[in-house]
Every structure is written in C-alpha cells, then in structure tokens.
Amino acid sequence: MDVPLWLGLIVVGWLGIKLVRPPLWLVAVLILGGYLLADSFLSPAIDPLAK
C-alpha cells in the first residue's frame, strides 16, 4: 500500500495533537521553526539528523 508522504504526515500530526494534546502555540512554533530552519544556513547540519 503506497501512501503519499503528505497524507502520512497529516495523519501522524493529527493523531499526535489528539493524543498528546500539546498547546497550540507549541505546534505553531515547531511548524514555523522547521519551515524556517529548512531554508537557512543550518540546513546542511540538520539534514543528516532528519534522514
């Protein structure tokens, strides 16, 4: 069964929010921070950790 990556991320994110109940500001900071770090000079250092 092939599931698109975006669909898998949405499902895992939704389950994480429903089960763990983190504050909404923390979810926003993690999403925004990850987006900003992915396009920064730190991305070569983070890339091996993400793989």
Image (cartoon, rainbow, N blue to C red):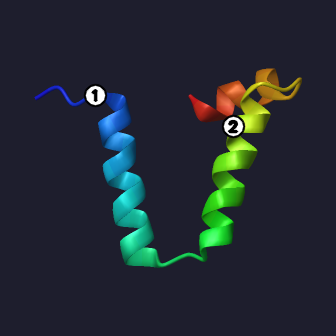
Q: Is residue 21 above or below residue 48?
A: below
Residue positioned 69% across, 26% down in the render: 47
Residue positioned 34% across, 64% down in the render: 15
**Residue nearest the observer in this picture, 22 or 47:** 22
The mark total stands at: 2
Place residue 48 in its image quadrant: top right
Place residue 19 in its image quadrant: bottom left
- Residue 33 x, y percent position in the rendering: 75, 47
Mark before the other along the chain sequence, 1 or 2: 1
**Residue nearest the observer in this picture, 10 or 45:** 10
Amino acid type at circle 1 is Pro
Residue positioned 17% across, 26% down in the render: 2
The residue where tag 1 is placed is 4
State the SS at label 2: helix
Which mark, residue 35? 2
Left or right: 23 as drawn, with respect to 5: right
The quarter of the image holding the N terminus is: top left
The quarter of the image holding the C terminus is: top right
